[in-house]
Image: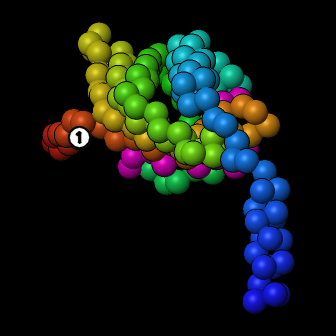
Amino acid sequence: MRRLVPALSLLATLAACQPAAPKVDFAAEEQAIRAQVAAFNTALAAYDVPAIDSIYAQDAVLLPPNQERRTGTASIEQSFAGLQPLKATMVLTPTSIMIAASGELAVEEGSWVYAMPTPDGGTFKDNGKYLVAWKKTNGKWLIQVDTWNSDNAPPAPAAPKK
């Protein structure tokens, strides 16, 4: 028993010396992510691929529908560079942002709309939902994983040529 009391006292002292869990201002972190989404939308509208790229982590993963997984900013840049020749537009709207208790990771859920002029003078439109995993790196929120899909059925195949 004599050994137990000092051991318990030592454990209590060590427990008191542990650093407190970081205080996370969840509202501020959510606003920081929403600001990054706004910057992403602005960069998309301007076809500013370097600005889009700056919102992704260097080892980010892009999981586009009906395409292979893309890793790293060079591959991601290629994906977004294709929008300008098509004169395509896209806008993301976050619906919820969940931030981990540590304040270092977050998941954003949202919806998107896409439009692109067609050769016949019309407009191809699509819309859907997305999930983005964010990671705070050097005080800045960056996209770590990005995936999305359409709410619409794929277009009908073209009629065979005769």
Seen at 29% across and 22% down, the residue is 125
How many numbered marks have been drawn onto this rendered protein structure? 1
Give left or right: position of 105 versus 128: right
Classify 10 Å Cα crowding around label 1: few (below 14), some (14-19), many (20 and above). Answer: few
Seen at 81% across and 64% down, the residue is 14
Reply yes or no: does residue 60 show up in magenta.
yes
Seen at 46% across and 33% down, the residue is 97
Give left or right: position of 42 versus 116: right
The residue to which callout 1 is attached is 154
Name which quarter of the figure residue 96 lies in.
top left
Q: Nearer the viewer, residue 137 or 152?
A: 137
Establish if 94 lies above or below 109. Answer: above
Q: Nearer the viewer, residue 26 or 37?
A: 26
The answer to whether residue 76 of the structure is visible from this angle is no
Q: Please provide the residue range marked out in magenta.
A: 53-66
Give residue 154's position: percent from left, percent from top: 23, 40
Name which quarter of the figure residue 137 lies in.
top right
Give residue 5's position: percent from left, percent from top: 78, 79
